[in-house]
Amino acid sequence: MARFLPVLTTVAAVAVAVYAFPASAAGPYDGNWIIDAPPAGGAIGAEGQYTCPALRMPFAVKDGQVMGDLHRTATGTIEIGKTSNSAPVTGTVGGDGTVSVTWENFHVSGKLSGAGGNVNWAGECGPRTATATKVGQ
């Protein structure tokens, strides 16, 4: 019995830890998301392109917290990843799907439902209505 006491003590300690600190279940909005905003207005620049082009903003949600780092590429797209010129994306998603996201001078608020949602996007080009889509399910 004496030689089994350390094993029994270890098993008991693990059981207490599992009971005291149960694993948290993923929230319904946890995962990777993309917000797509259409071009703003009808302004066309000198090179025949929208002065405020469509933008795609990826972000991740874990336990109701929006997180990640985003940066602009040389072509103007926004990508996930920490680089020397990246900025954090932050925000929250409530249990009812209410979402609020901030990145640089962009502010997104709206409602997620299931694997999609509608949001309002405000940034350097003014207000836009955008869609949110959960990816990689």
Image (spheres, grey):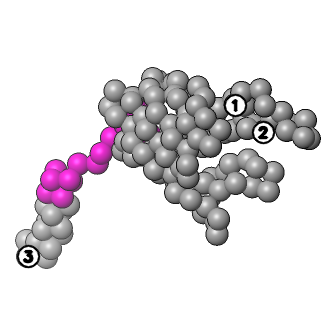
Point out which mark residue 40 bears: 1
In the picture, residue 11 is in which quadrant? bottom left
The range drawn in magenta is 16-30
* Secondary element at tag 1: loop
Disc 1/disc 3 C-alpha distance (Å)? 75 Å
Contact check, label 1 and label 3, Cβ < 8 Å: no
Magenta stretch secondary structure, dominant: loop
> Which residue is rendered at x = 70% and y = 31% of the image?
40
> Which residue is rendered at x = 47% and y = 42% of the image?
101
Asked whether residue 22 is drawn in magenta, I would say yes
Asked whether residue 65 is drawn in magenta, I would say no
Mark 1 or mark 3, which has the lower sequence index? 3
Residue located beneath label 3 in the image: 2
Crowding at dot 1, Cα within 10 Å, few <14 / some 14-19 / many 20+, comes out as some
The three-letter amino acid code for the residue at tag 1 is: Ala
Crowding at dot 2, Cα within 10 Å, few <14 / some 14-19 / many 20+, comes out as some
Crowding at dot 3, Cα within 10 Å, few <14 / some 14-19 / many 20+, comes out as few
Q: Is residue 20 above or below residue 32?
A: below
Q: Is residue 77 left or right of residue 135?
A: right
Is any part of residue 28 visible from this angle? yes
Point out which mark residue 51 bears: 2
Q: Is residue 92 left or right of residue 9?
A: right
Among all residues in the image, which is located at the extreme bottom?
A: 3
Disc 2/disc 3 C-alpha distance (Å)? 78 Å
> Which residue is rendered at x = 61% and y = 35% of the image?
126
Q: Is residue 129 left or right of residue 41?
A: left
Pair 2/3: label in front: 2
The three-letter amino acid code for the residue at tag 3 is: Ala
Contact check, label 2 and label 1, Cβ < 8 Å: yes
